[in-house]
Image: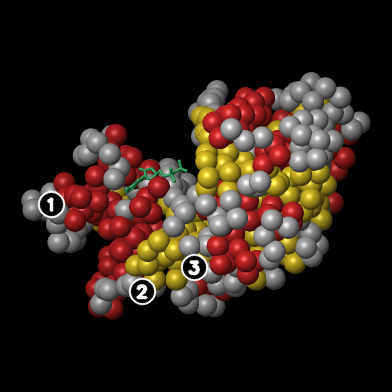
Amino acid sequence: MNKYVLTIDQGTTSTRASLIDKDGNVFYKAQQEIKCFFPYDGWVEQDAIDVWLSVLNVINDLLAKTNLTYKNIDSIGLTNQRETTIIWDKKTGVPVYNALVWQSRQSAYICDNLIDKTSFVRERTGLIINPYFSASKIRFILDHIENGQKRAEDGELMFGTIDTWIMYKLSNGKIFKTDITNASRTMLFNINTLKWDDDLLKLFNIPKCMLPEVCPSSYNFGYASLLKKNLKICGVAGDQQAALFGQNCIKEGDVKSTYGTGCFVLMNIGDKPIFDQGGLITTIAWQIGNEVTYAIEGSVFVGGAAIQWLRDQMRMFKKASDSEKYARNCENSLGVYVVPAFVGLGAPYWDDDCRGAVFGLTRATTKEHFIRATLNSIALQTKDVIKEMERISNKKIESLRVDGGASENSYLMQYQSDILSSKVILPKNLETTSLGAAYLAGLASGYWKDVNEISKVHKISKIYNPKMSNEEIIEIDNKWKKAVAATRLFK
Ligand code: ADP
């Protein structure tokens, strides 16, 4: 009988389920959109029950369409939007508040009061203090429901990131666990001792009894007994960490960049964390057995979204993929630089207050140059993060593995390779997040023997080799630096 690993990818905009076979092929996928609510400026919430039902729906859809049964499933791998925070009642399993989505800034005021704790938090968690992470979101919910603090202290409430919530539901309330990568995004987990940190819990006044047990990413978490009595959940990781694993970035120094709405760049830094005071964060990449692997991470807020902006706001073309045709219709960007700081700049600048800018316009500038310059800006922002990674890790990257929607733009990928002077590698299967979750699950269940076997399954579709001269790179770097600096001055 054919067996597959069932992966659930619970993302911010949709939930996806897929079946992955022994050769790493995605056999089938199902998808359902998730609604977000924006009650006030900067607030982003979801209905946790909706999120849970979408998981059930995509699994049912998958099995119905493929005519398979749970007997064909070896194990479940789960990957998820990170940091999103849910608190529910232990007795009833009913959420006490909407899920606070990672992007939501409603708990910013809590973080603003903790600025003097920056290095304390960094040394323990590898993170910068920001409402992005779960700790201040938990505090916010406890402060905005009746008797929140007391109910939490009395053990009546449970907290989970999305992985914990889904496992809790799939197991009929029997599994109350999280994986170490998700724990590392809460700002309550000490990435040195690998335990919930009592001092951080005290700082946010969060009772430990509401936190789940932290487990390795590749591990038998328990049974999804709601689906089938002996169906095991064997792999769990946050989406970016799963993508790093799914890209086979298993050696120290391996780097991947995901070109979606934003760009997420992660570098495997091996078995020890590095704490840098610069603009990147340190996080746990995964734990397999007793071995913990760390990563440094930088996120660019506007990546593919800059192309969406050209399409929807500037109305320059109909499809995002048309951007490539236009970019190739001119020889160069004619000295135009676009800095798409529409919501400020992310890593390594962390400048919330600046806004987008364009430099170098002349009477000769055309739509083609403008589009080309915007595509270039995605690669240039990614380069800024990678340069910071090279500085922190003291290593020049050999190659960059890429995925996400905009990685299908071969003009952009060639430019990325050129300005980095590195190879850019596109995998055959772009569903690296689901693949990573499947690999983690299949390793624990015995579906794949070891990491070497997985490396053999991983296939490459295309390699871009750098072609640009050093002089040209220096000239571009110089102009880009000036463009970013000028953008940051305009406030
Ligand atoms: P997400 O997972 O964040 O929703 P995706 O990985 O689906 O993102 O990628 C979609 C993003 O990539 C959009 O912002 C879109 O504008 C951009 N994009 C998609 N295809 C291309 C392309 N061929 N060239 C440039 N940008 C693209």
Q: Is residue 58 above or below residue 363?
A: above
Dot in front, 3 or 2: 2
Q: Of the residues shown, which amino acid type is indicated by label 1?
A: Thr
Percent from the top left, x then y, of residue 61? Answer: 57, 29
Are the residues at dot 3 and dot 1 in contact (C-beta closer than 8 Å)?
no
Report the residue at 39% width, 71% height from top.
423
- Closest to the observer: 11 or 336? 11
- Closest to the observer: 69 or 264? 69
Percent from the top left, x then y, of residue 234? Answer: 73, 49
Q: How packed is label 1: few (under 14 Cα within 10 Å), some, or many (20 or more)?
A: some
Q: What is the C-alpha distance between the residues marked 3 and 1?
A: 32 Å
Residue 330 in view here: yes
Return the residue found at the far front: 1
Disc 3 target residue = 388
Percent from the top left, x then y, of residue 226? Answer: 77, 30
Report the residue at 14% width, 57% height from top.
330
Q: Is residue 168 left or right of residue 151?
A: left
Q: Is residue 267 above or below residue 342?
A: below
Are the residues at dot 1 and dot 2 in contact (C-beta closer than 8 Å)?
no
Pointer 1 residue Cβ closer than 8 Å to ligand 1: no
Disc 2 target residue = 421
Q: Is residue 161 left or right of residue 457?
A: right
What number is the disc on residue 365? 1
